[in-house]
Image (tube, rainbow, N blue to C red):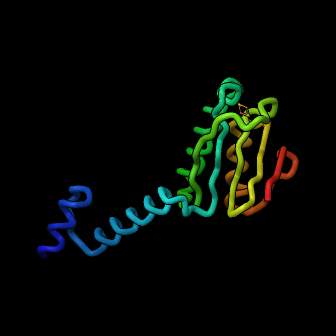
Amino acid sequence: MFHLEMVEEGVSGMKITSIEDLKKIKEEAQRSTSLREGNADYRIVVCMGTCGIAAGARQVMSSLLDEISVRGLKNVMVTQAGCIGLCDREPLLSVEKGDEKVFYGDLNPEKARRIITSHIVNGQIIGEWVVHVER
Ligand code: FES
């Protein structure tokens, strides 16, 4: 009992009424740790340099985040980068897994959603939108 009270105060202040609650808290803590430490299977990096933003990178970013949240995906993290020297293909992003980086260009919010469903969920690279690959 003493232990439960410690957890209750220490983690989030939420009222713990069952073992299920404790499990949820533990899972949530593990999930945020894995994202923080970059252990997600996929990392999506959106170019948010000046030309990226001018071309619509913010809308691309928000549609990515929305699709990930609607699908409840836990194996992907999204971050941003500055200019990577492909400004004429903005908006662009890279999908990174292990040592592989696949850069997609000339994006819009709808294409960004397709990248989540095809590349992240089904493991299918959309070849026609790829502007560069690093392995
Ligand atoms: S601003 Fe994104 S590639 Fe240059």
Would you identify the image quadrant in which residue 13 lies?
bottom left
Quick one: 52 or 12, which is closer to the camera? 52
Across and down, in percent, residue 34 comes to: 48, 63
Q: Is residue 62 left or right of residue 31?
A: right
> In percent of the image, x 69 and y 55: which residue is there?
96
Quick one: 87 or 3, which is closer to the camera? 87
Across and down, in percent, residue 114 comes to: 72, 48
Q: Is residue 101 left or right of residue 39?
A: right
For the N terminus, give its image quadrant.
Answer: bottom left
Quick one: 14 or 98, which is closer to the camera? 98
> In percent of the image, x 70 and y 52: which residue is there?
95
Q: Residue furthest top?
A: 54
Would you identify the image quadrant in which residue 38 lies?
bottom right
> In percent of the image, x 61 and y 39: which residue is there?
61
Q: Is residue 103 above or below residue 11?
A: above
Across and down, in percent, residue 36 comes to: 47, 56
Across and down, in percent, residue 17 comes to: 20, 68
View quadrant of ligand 1: top right
Would you identify the image quadrant in which residue 14 lies?
bottom left
For the C terminus, give its image quadrant.
Answer: bottom right
